[in-house]
Amino acid sequence: MLTLSGVGKRYPTGDRALTDIELTLPKGQVMALIGPSGAGKSTLIRCVNRLVEPTQGSIRLEDIELTKLSGQKLRHARRSMGMIFQEYALVDRLTVMENVLSGQLGYVGFWRSFLRRYPQEAVVEAFRLLERVGLPHALDKRADALSGGQRQRVGIARALLQSPKLLLVDEPTASLDPKTSRQIMRLIRELCAERDLAAIINIHDVALAKQFADRIVGLRAGEIVFDGQPSELTSEILTTIYGEEDWDTTPEPMEEDEEEQPAVVRSTSHEVMPALATGGAR
Amino acid sequence: MNTADTLAERRQQAARRGQWRRLAVIENPRLRWGLAIGAVVYLFLALASVEVNWARVAEGSARAVNFLGAFMQPDFISRYDDIVAGLMESLTMTLTSTVVGVLLAIPVGLGAARNISPLPIYLICRAIIAVSRTFQEIIIAILFVVMFGFGPLAGMITLAFATIGFMAKLLAEDIEDLDWRQVEAVRATGAGWLQIINQAVQPQVMPRLIGLSVYRLDINFRESAVIGIVGAGGIGATLNTSLSRYEYDTSAAILLIIIAIVLLCEYSSSHVRRWTQ
Amino acid sequence: MPVSFTSQGLPVWRRRTTRAQWLQYLAWLAGVSLFLLCWKLISDNTMWVFVEDAGRQGSDLISRMMPPRWEYANVLWKPMWDTLNIATLGTVIGVMMAFPVAFLAARNTTPHPLVRSVALMVIVSSRSINSLIWAMLLVTILGPGVLAGIIAIALRSIGFVGKLLYEAIEEIHPTPVEAISATGASRMQVMNYGVLPQVMPAFAGISVYRWDINIRESTVLGLVGAGGIGLQLNASINSLAWDQVSVIFIMIFATVLVSEWISARVRHAII
């Protein structure tokens, strides 16, 4: 469904962020993108919806060549790609409902959105999504009154209100505690299954990636160095992605719903990886 | 509480049916409409009390066109001597008044900081600040022109007085929220009051003091262009004369010079501020 | 930190090196000479006979101001109402014009660098020229009256509000803007949802602050004929009625204190 071929990105400063990326994502597949900080994970998913302009190669979503679009056509293409952010990227001073409804902005005209007169179906769907992510009571709360996990749920509802075919997810759990991280990952996973969505999830937590993804792609210094099943991800491969480390401290995927234990283990992997990863980056 | 709960529930029910409106900024409907109606009534009364002599405006629009034309062709030459003299006066007034004003503002500012000065001194200094800040420079200039006669001295004293109010207030606020632990540390070495000011207070407020002085230099230049209207010297007097003689091309030249100097001041002050931090 | 040794071999600490020390002396010397030069220019242009008289003139002035002629206050209500209107209407108009200018001037919302430099030019010219000068120009164009005052205040406010607002726009968090763009929103929708909510409190605060400043400025616009209480001030000074001048000063003082209090309260409530 999504095909990247020969995609590269070089910043005006001369830094190469991505080199010759070849990637095909079938419908309904949840793919985790792992790699050290600065490996180009964020750049890669931002190239897909053109928040960052790729400097070479082609990106096709179904039959549309995304790299050539501009103006109205780009905005229409963006509607079918929902994005979820690391720092939630909600508009703090708007209410939860306004934040969710902003997922409809690509579909309604300026004055309608300015006066907040959204079509009835859109409001029905927005509220259904709020109920689905478990926040119907927060309807009129301001976004900055919510906790981190709740904010991320609102961000997910906003992305889904776009009725996307593809989800681009940028470090969804990096600002969350271990328990909430797992809940959010599970929610994303379930929603993808319900709606038959493909997803690219940037994540630096290898344990979470192995547990929740169908496929894992490892990125190092802007190049793909691993592409395979979660079960194929061995210590040697982790070393090629991240550099030398004693990987045995990274646990196998946990059983469902253990609350105390993963908190301890995860926090170690969480801190160790980005720290050592910076060496291999750039 | 109960009504709020049911209101929230009602809004949820409505949203489930697809009806949702943005929450009003002011919740109480009576207050909301009261404020809106009050604003409309005020606007109506205020606009009704503006008397416009349309015949005069029509007559003036020709002058407006002349004036805009003058901006395209400013005349720096025919009143060259007047402009240079006015400009020199303005610049000297600006510089001396800022120096004198800042020097005098330091004791007033120290006196107006509640945490380092006794109550009677605090009240006196605060009174000086309040008077200096309330009245526009031009009003003060009128009084000083009466006292000191026409000319740049009255202007310089005016600007220095205004500078005291401005700088002393900000300095006092800075001192009031400075890091008290450093002061305690210096006091613990057995330092006297002046030594405490020099060793603990001065280093903390100095960078901002320099930045603010440069900023005030900029303000004083702009004000020096105005107080000439009442006879306190400077480029304002030249501008006033040229306007009353309808020599718009000269006025345009003066205004362009003012804009250029203000730009220069701002550019250099941002550099100075970066350098002091 | 320079530490040098004396002939006895004892270490001596000084704050600066010799070279830096000399440079600093030179800078001070230059500064002081510049100041003295300026002072000389001023003193050459001053009639010192008048200055020697200043103390007597001052005390004479105060004695003529006291006691204030309180009944004169009854004449001042209408000019005071005009002054408030000049400040308020001028602020409203200025703020409405400053709003689009700020969006055009902010680096992250401007449609084109060329538009940005034009908007910055507007802001700088408006800021550099005092409202009294604007009033002088407008009085020659529109004739004396409240209208000239309102427009003068508005023109001066554009630069002030525009500058502070565009700085606020440049400091917003970029991520919500990115997120709104990613939904496929149009440019105007991104402004409305991503930028506007973030700068709204700053905008309201800046406007109220400017209103407070405009009250002060509108009290003197009458000196050049642009309406308000300044007209009475000018008339009283010209007829040397200093006991009326003191009444006007007290009224101005009271009004400014009240407006400052209101503006502080409103800004406090917003933040």
Image (spheres, coloured by chain):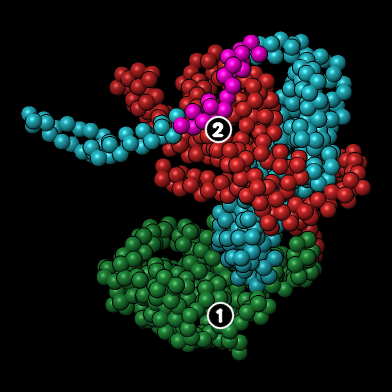
Chain colours: A green, B red, C cyan
Residue C104 location, quadrant: bottom right
Residue range (magenta): C37-57
- Reading the image, the residue beneath label 1 is A198
Q: Indicate yes or no whether the magenta region holds residue C40.
A: yes
* SS assignment at label 2: helix
Amino acid carrying mark 2 in the image: Met
Depth check: give the residue in front, B35 or A26: B35
Q: Residue at x 26, y 68 (%)?
A: A246
Magenta segment includes C249: no
Q: Residue at x 74, y 26 (%)?
A: C252
Image position of B75 (left or right of B245): left
Where is the N terminus of chain A found, in terms of image quarters? bottom right
Residue B89 in which image quadrant: top right
Q: What whole-number distance in Å separates the C-alpha atoms at marks 2 and 1?
A: 71 Å
Chain bearing tag 1 is A
Residue plotted at (79% across, 69% down)? A119
Residue A169 appearing in the image: yes
Of the 4 image quadrants, the one containing the C terminus of chain A is bottom left
Q: Amino acid at mark 1?
A: Ala
> Measured from the top left, where is residue C46 in percent x and y?
57, 24
Q: Nearer the viewer, mark 2 or mark 1?
A: 2
Q: Position of residue B269 (x, y in %)?
A: 49, 44
Vertical order, A61 against B145 (above or below) = below
In this rendering, position of residue A101 left or right of residue B153: right
Q: Which mark is residue B93?
A: 2
Question: As displayed, is residue B10 above or below residue B120?
Answer: below
